[in-house]
Amino acid sequence: MAVSANRLELLQIADAVAREKSIDRNIVITAMEDAIAKAARSRYGAETDVHAEIDAKNGELRLTRHMLVVEQVENSSNQITLEGARKHHPAAQVGDTIADPLPPLEYGRIAAQSAKQVIVQKVREAERDRQYAEYKDRIGEIVNGIVKRVEYGNVVVDLGRGEAIVRRDELLPREVFRNGDRVRAYIYDVRREPRGPQIFLSRTHPQFTAKLFAQEVPEIYDGIVEIRAVARDPGSRAKIAVISRDSSVDPVGACVGMRGSRVQAVVNELQGEKIDIIPWSQDIATFVVNALAPAEVAKVVLDEERERIEVVVPDQQLSLAIGRRGRNVRLASQLTGCDIDILTEQEESERRQAEFESRTRTFIDALNVDEVIGQLLASEGFTSVEELAMVEIKELAGIEGFDDDTAAELQTRARDYLAKIEAELDAKRIELGVEDALKEVPGITTAMLVKFGENGIKNVEDLAGCATDDLVGWNERKDGENVRQAGILDGFDLSREEAEAIVMQARLKAGWISEADLAPP
């Protein structure tokens, strides 16, 4: 009867653990078998190959020792001669593994002592595998849970069928949770880890805000309204950009709700975080204007190559456009993906005046003309001496107060000036040791050659080894903002396509590639 009770007890333990941990019963039984086998090895020898099997129906335990049949025994713990094996296994052959039964052990004592640690470890591993498999495809969902404990500011959350963690930096500022509190958060990562948390939650992630709106706004859930972008300063302010697939549905109004009921529900969950809901636009200039709301914008200048936006606002709107501690412009930048520079109308006027005076001075010095002519050329839109040298005579002569002779003289002076500058630059190139062969690469000017020389690029191979970014620079995303890294040819107004063409031509000239490599696919 004692044996029957013990058998029943084993199965009851397996069933209870399987239910409690939400894992397969067979996994628990396998863990018990491993534990009993380990305990048996402590009795029969660590090198003894002991196997334990528990009948899943009646709980009967069977212990066996496995031994390899060999011609000459080197390890008596797990090897046996052919002669010895055939005493109980007449059909045994060299290389076979035979199993002999072992006498039963008091596995009640084993389970309580030696086996406990193995069982706990195996069950824990199975539980972690089950949690990972169950939650790995749920990244991007909002889950609800109960605070289980707080460790050094990190909140451990019981999800019912899993345990997750909200790290301190993923909590809203001044947010405090205690054991037993309910918490709602966003699953941003699930990782298979040997120990510690595997499910990572956030209440500061931008998509947490988006998912909260999806729960509160049926039009978002149904796909009529779409959230295109989210930017957050967690706990303080957020901006979301929305668009409607149905022209009869106002996306902003749908998210706000009657008397602000929908947006207020999200605000309450985010501990009072203010939320600006703006219409998304494919036109980046319009999108930027919307993103800077509630500030009014007078003008937008877009630099697509550098991914920068210059926004001009009325003088009295500057502080509103920038926001407290730069929050409004920073969130607008995150929302649009562009760096935004804010100028007042007065600052822009002063800058335009400075640029006009600079161009005027350039024409006066380069062409040896008086101030009136320099101002006239600048006011007509000419920005450089190169433009004057290349423009059609009739266009230059069409300026009020100019005739053909004046136009021809100005163009001659412009070309003479450029020739002089070219000679000076070429002398500088030679002084820097830049080889003549580099001059033959299409798209390169003498001024560029000087810049190359100043940056250690002296021959075709040096240029061929450059990347496009080396020439025109690149943007790095740091703290949610684009940080501009300067290129060697900054200031030459090169597009990325033009810079790439220069590098590819250098590689062609260096013999690294063929003409076929330059052909479009």
Image (cartoon, helix red, strand yellow):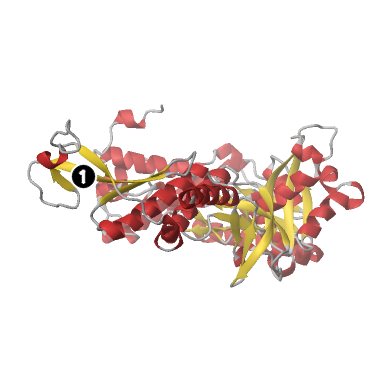
Q: Quadrant of residue 330?
A: bottom right
Percent across and percent down for residue 16 are 57, 50
Q: Nearer the viewer, residue 455 or 397?
A: 455
Q: Say if 493 sits above or below 484 in the image.
A: above
Residue 437 visible (yes or no) = yes
Q: Nearer the viewer, residue 226 or 330?
A: 226
Q: Residue at x 38, y 42 (%)?
A: 502
Q: Quadrant of the C terminus?
A: top left
Inspect the image, locate mark 1, and give the three-letter code of the amino acid beneath it.
Answer: Met
Percent across and percent down for residue 419 are 39, 51
Q: Residue at x 80, y 39 (%)?
A: 218
Question: Going by the image, does 485 lie left or right of 186?
Answer: left
Question: Going by the image, does 435 lie left or right of 489?
Answer: left
Q: Residue at x 21, y 39 (%)?
A: 97
Percent across and percent down for residue 328 are 72, 61
Q: Residue furthest right?
A: 259
Residue matched to label 1: 67
Question: Going by the image, does 100 lie left or right of 479?
Answer: left
Q: Nearer the viewer, residue 465 or 199?
A: 199
Q: Residue furthest front?
A: 1
